[in-house]
Amino acid sequence: MTDLRKDLVLGLVLLAAGAGWSALAWATLSPGFGGGDIGPRAFPLAFGVILMGLSALFIANTLGRDTGGAAAKEGSASILWGPALLLLLEIAVYGALLEKIGFVLATPLLVLAVLGANLKIRGPLTLAAMAAGLTAGCWLVFGKLLGIYLPGGTWVDLG
Amino acid sequence: MDMFLNAALLALDPWAIGAVGFGTFIGLVFGSIPGLTFTVALALALPVTFAMDSVPATGLLLGTYIGGMTGGSVSAILLGIPGTPSAAATVMDGHPMAKRGQASIALGAAVVASVFGGIFSLAVMIVSVNLVSRLAIGFGPAEIFALVVFGLSTICGLCGGSILKGLISGVVGLMVMTVGMDQIEGVPRMTFGSIGLMSGVSLLVAMIGLFAVPFIIEASAGDGGGQGAGRMARIRADLPGLRLLLSKAWLMVRCSALGTGIGAIPGTGGAIASFLAYDHARRTSADKASFGQGNLDGVIAPEAANNAVTGGTLIPLLSLGIPGDPATAIVLAGLMIHGISPGPALFMNHATEVYGMYVAVVIAYLWVLALQLAGIRLFVHVLKIPRELLAAGVLVLCLIGAWSVRNSVFDIYAMGIIGVAAYVLVALRVPITPIILGMVLGPTIENEFRTALMLSGGSADIFLHSPIALLFLGLAALVIVLQAVGEIRLRASQQKVNA
Amino acid sequence: MKMRLALGGGFAVLAAASVLSLGVPQARAEFPEKPVEMTVLFGGTASTIAQVLSETMAGELGEPVVPVSRTGGGGAVGYSHVMATAPDGYSIVWNSNSVNTTAHVGHVPYSYEDFVPIARVSEETPALAVNAARGWTSLQDMAREVSASDDHLKVGISGKGSFTHLVSAALFDAMGIGDQVTFIAYGDGKAPVELLAGRIDAAIQWPGQFKSYVDTGDLSVLAVTGSERIDFLPGVPTAQEQGVDIDITMWRGLAAPKDTPPEVVEKLAAAAEAATNSEAFRKAAATMGFQPAYAGPQDFAALIARDDAFYAGLLKKLGLGQ
């Protein structure tokens, strides 16, 4: 996809998001009562409309750039959808596990998954050392030394 | 004078100096680590002070606050991930400097600017606490609204390449902060009935997602060959020279004055001050084009300003009993539990404690100077850690940080979602710093505007009849016009080149 | 492949650990045998009192009591969390009237009946302050002058439906000037400064926020809204003393999820009682401006039920209830 196409898609997605947001604000929030009370709806609605306006401008601008033809200066990086969505999945699973099996068990699993699947670290020693080291280090420094509350699990609780 | 000597004796007691040093160290640690901030550090430090005498206790809290404010620049410069929202502006030039191999110069300058800003604001406070607090009382909802609009106008300076993309990202930030409980009306907004969303998106969690998650995803594009972070130039640990720093003295003075003023107005805070200072430095610089590429002024200005905020916020905190943010609210609780009830009578009833606090602030900055300058030589070695391993470590720290904000899994999900969205935006060359600015200013801008209109019964006169509000609205308009004119000139000159 | 092995290893450890924890028969040891987690719903004063309380309670119970801040949504986040935890006494909530008020404003999937009351621990009495320059010295002064004019009184509150809003509405109704009040909602507790600057005419807040201003003579506190005067502002009469019939205070206490065993509740209540009477807690009360006010599980339950009916009526009258 060229930068131009990408910008066009970005503009359209933002326009749709602005429209959806504004519609939701209009439908679910109450207007003010007058007399100085502008109510909880005014600002979210205004922001949504502004986003729609800016996105429309942006789309127009992008289309204009097309005919101008002198745009392709700044090459944008290609989006790594795979690693991005994988990381999101890993964070989601971590969140789900955190209060079930506790920080001490969930964290090494996350570190192994992220290092192995996202960051392509293959050395078993590095993997094991990182998983154990990060977990133990954080648990000791943050949980014990600095007194941050780290969750224990409801299924398994190792502290 | 007797009272001052008495206070100085109390504050210079080895125990008290140790307590301040301990607080400063904890604050620096929390501030330096992406995801953990001084707000969490203060909440954890508070119970420790219950059993202490009032002077060491307040010293410990102030040290934690000051250390935390200063520490935020470390990961902002080294990793491009601000340690606190107040350090978000420091990323823009601090991180490019680190990529050029000048990390230690940026860190050193940040420390010196921070200490300068902090001491400057303390001096202002000692000399003119009454005057400043009287001025601060003049800032009602209409005036604060106008000031925040002025802050928002600096968005143009944060946009990088495309003004439109920058504005879009600012609006997205404003929108995100409307999710959750509406503070004025007490109704949930845009929550789809979810309890998690009712608590809203925490600024801190969003900030971790915005800066740290793209860092981690980008690390996975590497080949696993174990290079240092970001393929940096050779890592050195030179500190900035005295002459270089002296040449920036006037900039530090201006930004410290700005930070002290912003800090004195309740409801503003470090992040607004640092963005305004950054914009000021860029606007007054002879070399505007190098901002965002690693200009040292872009590090010094926000760091001087955000530490000047510490002295500034102490003014309304002590003289009016009004905390400017959740962090100073904890300091306030710490004072009250020791029987020091802040407010206009504080200086009558507790002069010794107040002088003790002044001395403690100075000691805290001496600790900051010593600890940070010694630490820089260690910090820069972070850059030698292979990028992949560093990314995994940053991820764990950020998850702990996101969790610790409200001890809730919701914030972990929020961090992930915001982070991946931010990554996509970064890849599409949409600047994300304006999102932070929008998030910082969003709630204030809306609440103050609505409160102002309630006060006036719906009439716009409340903005038009206030000289202070008019001044800031005028400044905001001026900034926008200047920006637009500059933009048109730039376009024109580009077209000439193309033709 | 190596990664799969590593992950497999992780799961093996996990499995072994869960077998360990499930396999050992649960010895019916005395409660508590591990730390008790106390969910705190708000920052500021609420969280500071919780920290003082938890330290003294831990001494009584012999196990740590860990205050865990779960703020947001006007308490909804924390209440929902505790409601969903196991009713074993290891997860309790540092609650307040907010359980009554938020439930009736709607938007939350719980009510006070989803929790077992453990003990009321403290009370905070709201106080009404006005700018001293107005010259009012009593509620009558204020009511007389306001009703003689056509003006609307600007009253600062923390937000619609907030506790300060409810108390203000009830007080001004009882004074007979309820129709001449415009509520100005601030997102936060800036009332003293706004009063000082003269942007609002009156505000109800916590005594600790007004103390220093009263000492300097900038603000006058006309009344406290409880049935008794408070030690923190001994010179300030109650509203009842001035012929205005109102008795509203905010309590804070402890509650556990529904179905927590009574013997566990008793044990926690005993620890809370001892903590409430402790030196440290009383000292904190004196400096921060709240009153230690222990009430046992039964009394506390009756109080919550009575309050619930009261706030339901008040919110409905204000057009905020469901």
Image (cartoon, grey):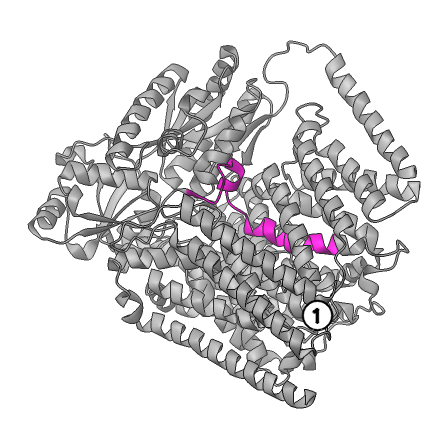
| Residue depicted at 51% across the width and 28% down the height | C56
Number of other residues with Cα within 10 Å of mark 1, as a class: few under 14, some 14 to 19, many 20 or more: many
Please provide percent x and percent y for residue A148.
63, 39
| Residue depicted at 24% across the width and 52% down the height | C219
Q: Is residue C109 above or below residue B333?
A: above
Q: Is residue B67 above or below residue B202?
A: below
| Residue depicted at 63% across the width and 36% down the height | A149
Residue C4 visible (yes or no): yes
Relative placement, left or right, of B338 versus C141 is right
Relative placement, left or right, of B233 versus A59 is right
Q: Find disc 1 in the rendering and name its residue.
A: B106
Q: In this orientation, which residue lies closer to the viewer: C45 or C15?
A: C15
Whether residue B22 is in magenta: the answer is no
Q: Residue furthest front?
A: A67
Please provide percent x and percent y for residue C256.
49, 22
Please provide percent x and percent y for residue C158.
35, 46
Whether residue B204 is in magenta: the answer is yes
Relative placement, left or right, of B293 versus C255 is right
Label 1: state its secondary structure: helix
Residue B69 visible (yes or no): no
Q: In this orientation, which residue lies closer to the viewer: B387 or C94?
A: B387
Chain where mark 1 sits = B
Q: In this orientation, which residue lies closer to the viewer: B148 or A64?
A: A64
| Residue depicted at 50% across the width and 19% down the height | C268
Region in magenta:
B188-216
Q: How many marks?
A: 1
> Label 1 amino acid?
Ala
Q: Quadrant of residue B118?
A: bottom right
Label the magenta part by its dominant secondary structure. helix
Q: Residue furthest left?
A: C148
Please provide percent x and percent y for residue C199.
26, 58
